[in-house]
Image (cartoon, helix red, strand yellow):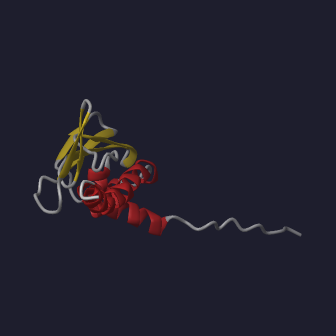
Amino acid sequence: MRACLPALLVALTALPLCRCAYHDSSLAETAQHSLIGMSVGDLDMCAGLPSKSEQINPATQLRSYEQNESTNSGINLTFRVIGGGMNFGNGGYCHATFKLVNGQVTALSYAGDTSSAGLPDAVCAPIVRTCVQQQSKRAPANTNVVTSQR
């Protein structure tokens, strides 16, 4: 029974971290679809000014935003598994790159150590959270009104 106690304690500690990471991972994935079509002005308002920007040609621009979670707050648990380990806790970094064509977002990609609790792109969520919330408020309700013409 005593041998099971540490494992149980670890599992109970990791559960809330996994739940938060799941939400953040899902949000980052949603952003890759829902932010397509956002204007450069709206992107600046919700994500702030980019840390790097590159004008590829007159119509195409890349904007990069960075998130670094190298803090020591919270709990950091590493489990050794064959071929490496799995980290539960704070840490990681994300470079979110938006591709804009004619002032509209056409693509969003993530690079870096973006996983948290084994879930992809969870570290990127703080970059896009406000933008996704802004887009969801702007999403038009189904306003297809059928009118009859007589």
User: The N terminus is located in which quarter?
Assistant: bottom left
Total residue callouts = 0
Residue 132 figure quarter: bottom left
- Direction top: furthest residue: 83
Residue depicted at 41% across the width and 48% down the height: 32
81 or 116, which is in the foreground?
81
Judge whether residue 42 can be spotted in this image. Answer: no
| In the image, residue 134 above or below residue 69 | below
- Direction left: furthest residue: 72
Residue depicted at 38% across the width and 59% down the height: 23
Residue depicted at 33% across the width and 60% down the height: 15
- Direction front: furthest residue: 1
Give the percent coordinates (x, y) of residue 21. 32, 56
139 or 2, which is in the foreground?
2
User: The C terminus is located in which quarter?
Assistant: bottom right
Residue depicted at 23% across the width and 60% down the height: 48
